Image (cartoon, rainbow, N blue to C red):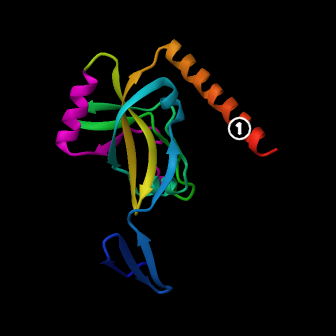
Amino acid sequence: MPTNLRFCARSKAEISSERGVIRLDKNKITVVAQNKKAYHDYFVLETVEAGLELFGTEIKSVRESRVNLKDSWCSFDGGEMYARGVHISPYEKGNLFNRDPMRPKRLLLHKREIRHLFDETRQMGYTAVPLRMYIRGSYAKLEIGLCKGKKNYDKRADIAAKDARRSIERAIKERFHS
């Protein structure tokens, strides 16, 4: 168990324990989950970083990358913002302390950020969608995208552009690596 936490240099923290000193890099980002379907279904106009209100066993599951963001969305309730549809699997050793995996997770944002996102999502066709979850330092963060839905022809155009890019890269690789 860590016995002493002290901060040094701007982005590092040291934890002294029985096993010696452990350094934590507060700026290191470990991506836990990505919502690739969101990039397929929406145009991402802007992104916002939000903290997550998680309980003990939930953060342990997040650190083990047992998270699914597919079909998740953000909603507003009582001046607060919640991530809904985010599935955090129960922690195996959590026993009775585990929470409902699909419970709405409260997002930690400044009031002005919540107000801005609320105003933008009131427009027709705009929504707030979780794009990825990551751990920065010792905190779980959720990247929220302000998105506008794609039409079917937009999706087909994206797929065609991706295929064209792949064929060009393949041709270049064959040309210069032969």
- Residue that extends furthest to the right in the rendered view of this protein: 178
In the figure, is residue 116 to the left or right of 164?
Answer: left
* Residue 78 seen in this snapshot: no
Side of 161 relative to 100 (left or right)? right
Judge the density around disc 1: few (<14), some (14-19), many (≥20) Cα neighbours within 10 Å.
few
**Image position of 35 (left or right of 9):** right
154 and 168: which is toward the camera: 168
Residue 4, how many percent across, how many down? 35, 82
Verify whether residue 86 appears in magenta.
Answer: no
Q: Secondary structure at mark 1?
A: helix
Q: Is residue 148 above or below residue 3?
A: above
Residue 11 quadrant? bottom left
Q: Nearer the viewer, residue 86 or 97?
A: 86
Q: Quadrant of the N terminus?
A: bottom left
Res. 119 visible in picture: yes
Q: Residue at x 53, y 35 (%)?
A: 36
Viewer-closest of 147 and 102: 147
Q: Position of residue 63 (x, y in %)?
A: 50, 57
